Structures are given as structure tokens and as C-alpha cells.
Image (cartoon, rainbow, N blue to C red):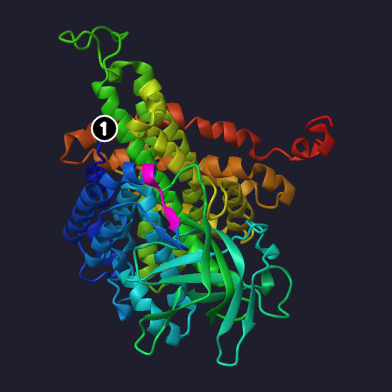
């Protein structure tokens, strides 16, 4: 299995040459931050990902997690790597400084998160959920709960989980049955069963803090009657340390297609003591503080596995000798030419590269907007929030769909060897497949994009996103590419506006096509912008690599948008015409 190597050169190009990170930090008032510091953070993050986390990936997949006497053990080396992770402060990068967080910009943290997902997705998942739990507790919990739990969640001394799904209630949380009974001391006793809980139990930390959706007595029906509760694995003593075991247990570890080294648990809450987070019956809104962050992080997971697959495929294509290239002998000193010289293999590798690097640019643009939201308080913050809201389902949906395509291409480059476990390529396919499903399936992301983010606010989020991209296009130095990008952006904007006012059923039928149409269009703009910026780079490999990959994307991948566009404005009558019995003629 090829050794993971962090894509530092491309990340530094995006930060320094494309996003002009020094100027960005000055503009938003991020004191103490500059390109030199961010580059050092990324270099150290790369070292940790490559040396501490990546070597555990293959063995972790083989061994998996085990449930022994009610407790979960993770593969060898996983706890030790986590202890090193929190000792070096990685978990606290984005945390509130009032609770010992580092309050770093997202543009400094997102590249590290990508590298960790690429190095070992199973290992990374538990810290992702902890970071999301931190956001919910920080924003919605009482001061007393923050004082007891937030610092240790931010540091990573304790981990956090998100408990939504029940056996009968997945995407439709209105069906949720878990109950919470109020107690005289202000606490609640939470009872119910949850499934698919990432990091539900493990051997990494002394406590695990569960955030659980449940219903209070006489609460309204549906999602309006759901509340959020903080339920620790261990209750705290007078010194704030884990003491008595709470009535929380692991029913089983889910037997999964991939991410086998991640402890995905069935959790049983049997009158477990917990405390309300946020207001009564407002739990779903509180939980969405976690979910919106997690959705972007899931997109980053897809980006990471795509990068890992591309690296593996490229390494193999360079080494594997098979036949002579149709354009003529390339390696006369060898018995055959490397796969890399075959045009079809080049096409596969370029597809991997163009999609992966394009999505990395999208992720970094998103991170830049999160910086703006975090550090500013004027109209820029309002606009950034709209851009983030609009791009979240695109990042989650497209990046994970992209990852499935890219990791499957990785197997294809290897041929039969790609199907064999020892090479590691099939693991990436298995691991990344879940990313299209959890935190809201990609179909739900598409409906959210077209039904809420595009149409519900009358196009305001669309306008904010269009304005941001337009400002980047206006600053491009390459006039030819600028004209291409401007025309592409205007076409996307016009097509999007044409959907405003469409029937809800037609929008739902067009949702996935609109998400993909938007993603391919936006990536086209970003590729033209990157290629324009790369022309001024001092690294000749970046100059030529970005130019040639941009040309490939515009010529061979961007036309995919036209297929999606052709059906976006089509009425859904053909989708709805087939009756139930006509599917199988029974």
C-alpha cells in the first residue's frame, strides 16, 4: 500500500498564491495570524498525519473494534495516536479561547483535517464528532454545563458524540421515540435506543459526552417536540472528574462495509442522567449547530479519501510496466512502458487530480468564508453566512459523490490488484461510501440546496455566492480565462434563477441534478481562477500542472454540467407517473 504523503505543495499554493492568506488575515483582523504561521501549522499537521496516523490505517481496517464486557477496544496504536494528538493541541485548534481553545482561523485548520481524513478516516471520525459537539455546547449550553464540560471537550481530554438516529427514525426525526423525564434537581432521565453512533464508546478517554435528542413529556408532536440533552458516560464528582457510571451502555458495534476501525455503536440509555442543552423543544435547532459543521467535515472526508486514492493510483501507474504506449515507446530501456503513458490511464489520473484539486479549492474557499464569519461583525459576516449556508450541501454532497468516483477509478488503475485488499485501494472505496449517507444522505443535501438554500429565501444565498465568485473572477489577471469564468458563472446564475418559483415536486425531482450542475459549474470557475493565479507562481510544476489540469477539466469534465442542466427545468411528471405495482409488475 503506498505511503500517504500530505499534499502540502498544493495546499500552500491555495493559501499563498490563490487566497492571498496574509491579506485575508489583515482584512478580517485575525491578529497574530500570517502565512508563515499557517504554513508551519500545516507542516506539523502533515508530519503527524504521515507518521502517527497513516501507518495505523491498514491494520485498523483488518482488526477493527471489539466489544468486550460492555466496553469497546479500538485497534492497537489508535489510543496512543489520539493521546499524542491532544497533547500537541490539535483538537483545540478552533476552540473558544475562554475555555482553553486556540481560536485559529478555519483556513489554518481545514488543511490539517483533510490530511487526517486522507491518512486514516476511521481514526479521524471520533475527533470530528467531538469538534461538532463543542460547537453545540459552546453555543447552546448553560454556563454551568460549559464550566463542567467545555474545556475538556475542546482539549480532547473527553470526546463527544451526536445521538440522533433510532432504528425506526433516520432522516425523519419526527418519528423519534427517546424520552426524557424531568427531575426535581433540574436534571433529566433519558431513556431510548440510538444507532449508528460514531465514537459511542472507546478506550481513548476517561469520559464520553453524549448529546442526545429526546422528547419531554407532553411535548408537541413531530420535530417541534424534540429537545437536546447532555448525557455523560460517567457522572462527575465534586472535583469535576468522572466518577459514577451513568446508565448508558453499548448494545453492539455495527458491522459495517467500511470504516471498520471506527467504533460505530448501538447505544442504550436506560434512565441515564442528563441535562438540557438549549431551550425545551428546540433540540433540533441546537443539533443542527453540530450537523452543519459535520456536513462540511464529511465533505472533507471525501476530499481526503480522494487524495489518498489519487496518490495510490499515480504511484502504481508510474511503477507498473504493461505494454508499449500507443504514441510510441516511452521507456526503451524497459521491457514495457509504465501504465502512466497509456492515454486512458492518463485520463483516469487526470480525472482524479482535477476533481480532487478542484474540491480542495472549494473547501479552502469555504474555510475562508468561515474565517470571515468568525472574525468580522459587519455586512461581510452576514454575506459569509449566506455563502456558507449555500455551499454546505454542495460541499457535503458533491465532494462525497466525487470521492466514490475517484476511489473507484483508483481500483481501475490497479486492475486486478486494486481488487485485492493488500494494496489498500478497495479499503478507500469501502471507507468513503458511508460519506454519501451519514449526516443526511446526498439526496437530502440536494433537496436542502434547491428547496431551502436556493428558493426559500428568494435567491439571497444564491446572490451572495454569485457575488463572492464574481469578485474573484473580476480580480483574475488572465483576461481569456476571466471571460470564460464570467460566462460560466453567469450561465449558472441565470439557470439557478430560472428555478425560483418552480413547483416543489419539480424542484425535488431536479434536486440532485441541480447540485451536480452547480458543483461542476463552480469548480469550473475555480479551476480557471486557479490556473490564472498559478501563472505567477515561482514553482514551474504548479504553473504547468494547474494550466494543463484546468484545460483537461474545462474540456472533458465541465461538459458533464450540460447533462444535468438539460433536465433541471423538466417537470417531474415522468418521475411520478409510474404507480407502485408498475415497478415490478406484481
Q: Which residue is mark 1?
A: 545
Q: Could you say which is closer to the camera, residue 493 or residue 323?
A: 323
Disc count in the image?
1
* Image location (x, y in percent) of residue 573: 78, 38
Above or below 216: residue 355: above
Q: Residue furthest front?
A: 69
Q: Quadrant of residue 563?
A: top right
Q: Quadrant of residue 238?
A: bottom left
Locate residue 246, reporting x and y percent.
49, 77
Q: Quadrant of the C terminus?
A: top right
Taking depth in this image into account, of 209 and 147 the one nearest to the observer is 209
- Compared with residue 451, is residue 285 higher up or lower down, i.e. above or below? below
Residue at image position (32%, 71%) is 157
Q: Is residue 552 visible?
A: no
Question: Callout 1: few (<14), some (14-19), or many (20+) C-alpha neighbours within 10 Å?
Answer: some
Q: Residue furthest bottom?
A: 184
Say if the magenta span includes residue 425: no
Task: Give, as a single range, the part of the protein colored magenta.
Answer: 62-67
Residue 182 x/y as whole percent: 62, 85
Q: Is residue 49 left or right of residue 243?
A: left
Q: Nearer the viewer, residue 583 or 256?
A: 256
- Could you tell me if residue 107 is visible in this image? yes
Q: Secondary structure at mark 1?
A: helix
* Residue 129 in the image: above or below residue 58: below
Q: Find residue 44 and report its horizontal and vertical position in percent.
A: 19, 55
* Residue occupying image coordinates x 30% and y 68%: 92
Quarter of the image that includes the N terminus: top left
Q: Nearer the viewer, residue 208 or 92?
A: 208
Instruction: Please say whether residue 64 is one of the residues in the magenta stretch.
Output: yes
Q: Which quadrant of the figure has residue 416?
A: top left
Amino acid at each position: 500500500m503506498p505511503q500517504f504523503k500530505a499534499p502540502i505543495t498544493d495546499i500552500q499554493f491555495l493559501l499563498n498564491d490563490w487566497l492571498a492568506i496574509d491579506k485575508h488575515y489583515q482584512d478580517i483582523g485575525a491578529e497574530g495570524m500570517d502565512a508563515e504561521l499557517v504554513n508551519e501549522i500545516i507542516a506539523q499537521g502533515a508530519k503527524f498525519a504521515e507518521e502517527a496516523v497513516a501507518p495505523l490505517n491498514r491494520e485498523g481496517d483488518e482488526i477493527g473494534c471489539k466489544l468486550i464486557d460492555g466496553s469497546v477496544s479500538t485497534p492497537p496504536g489508535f489510543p496512543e495516536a489520539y493521546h499524542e494528538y491532544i497533547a500537541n493541541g490539535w483538537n483545540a485548534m478552533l476552540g473558544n479561547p475562554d475555555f482553553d481553545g486556540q481560536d485559529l482561523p478555519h483556513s489554518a485548520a481545514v488543511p490539517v483535517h483533510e490530511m487526517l481524513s486522507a491518512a486514516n478516516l476511521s481514526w479521524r471520525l471520533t475527533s470530528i464528532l467531538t469538534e461538532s459537539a463543542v460547537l453545540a455546547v459552546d453555543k447552546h449550553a448553560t454556563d454551568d454545563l460549559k464550566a463542567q464540560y467545555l474545556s475538556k471537550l475542546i482539549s480532547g481530554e473527553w470526546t463527544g458524540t451526536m445521538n440522533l438516529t433510532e432504528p425506526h427514525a433516520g432522516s425523519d426525526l419526527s418519528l423519534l421515540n427517546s424520552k426524557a423525564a424531568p427531575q426535581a434537581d433540574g436534571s433529566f432521565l433519558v431513556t431510548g435506543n440510538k444507532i449508528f453512533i460514531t465514537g459511542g464508546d472507546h478506550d481513548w478517554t476517561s469520559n464520553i459526552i453524549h448529546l442526545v435528542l429526546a422528547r419531554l413529556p407532553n411535548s408537541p408532536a413531530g420535530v417541534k417536540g424534540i429537545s437536546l440533552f447532555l448525557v455523560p458516560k460517567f457522572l462527575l464528582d465534586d472535583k469535576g472528574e468522572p466518577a459514577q457510571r451513568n446508565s448508558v451502555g453499548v448494545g453492539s458495534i455495527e458491522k459495517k462495509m467500511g470504516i471498520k476501525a471506527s467504533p460505530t455503536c448501538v447505544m442504550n440509555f436506560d434512565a441515564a442522567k442528563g441535562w438540557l442543552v438549549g431551550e425545551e423543544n428546540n433540540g433540533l435547532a441546537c443539533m443542527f449547530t453540530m450537523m452543519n459543521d459535520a456536513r462540511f467535515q464529511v465533505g472533507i472526508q471525501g476530499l481526503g479519501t480522494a487524495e489518498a486514492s489519487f496518490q495510490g493510483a499515480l504511484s502504481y501507474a508510474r511503477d507498473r510496466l504493461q505494454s508499449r504506449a500507443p504514441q510510441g515507446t516511452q521507456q526503451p530501456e524497459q521491457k514495457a512502458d509504465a501504465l502512466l503513458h497509456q492515454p486512458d490511464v492518463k485520463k483516469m489520473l487526470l480525472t482524479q487530480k482535477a476533481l480532487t484539486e478542484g474540491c480542495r479549492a472549494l473547501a479552502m474557499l469555504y474555510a475562508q468564508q468561515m474565517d470571515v464569519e468568525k472574525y468580522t461583525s459587519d455586512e461581510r459576516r452576514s454575506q459569509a453566512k449566506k455563502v456558507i449556508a449555500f455551499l454546505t450541501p454542495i460541499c457535503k454532497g458533491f465532494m462525497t459523490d466525487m470521492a466514490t468516483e475517484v476511489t473507484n477509478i483508483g481500483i481501475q488503475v490497479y486492475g486486478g490488484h486494486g481488487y485485492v485488499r493488500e494494496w489498500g485501494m478497495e479499503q478507500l472505496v469501502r471507507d468513503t461510501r458511508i460519506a454519501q449517507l451519514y449526516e443526511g444522505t446526498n439526496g437530502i443535501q440536494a433537496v436542502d440546496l434547491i428547496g431551502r438554500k436556493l428558493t426559500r429565501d428568494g435567491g439571497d444565498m444564491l446572490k451572495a455566492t454569485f457575488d463572492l465568485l464574481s469578485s474573484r473572477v473580476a480580480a483574475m489577471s488572465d483576461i481569456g480565462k476571466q471571460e470564460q469564468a464570467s460566462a460560466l458563472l453567469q450561465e449558472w446564475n441565470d439557470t439557478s434563477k430560472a428555478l425560483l418559483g418552480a413547483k416543489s415536486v419539480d424542484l425535488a425531482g431536479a434536486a440532485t441534478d441541480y447540485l451536480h450542475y452547480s458543483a461542476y459549474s463552480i469548480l469550473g470557475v475555480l479551476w480557471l481562477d486557479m490556473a490564472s493565479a498559478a501563472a505567477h507562481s515561482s514553482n514551474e510544476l504548479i504553473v504547468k500542472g494547474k494550466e494543463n489540469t484546468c484545460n483537461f477539466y474545462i474540456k472533458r469534465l465541465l461538459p458533464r454540467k450540460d447533462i444535468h442542466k438539460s433536465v433541471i427545468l423538466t417537470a417531474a411528471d415522468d418521475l411520478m407517473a409510474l404507480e407502485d405495482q408498475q415497478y415490478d409488475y406484481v
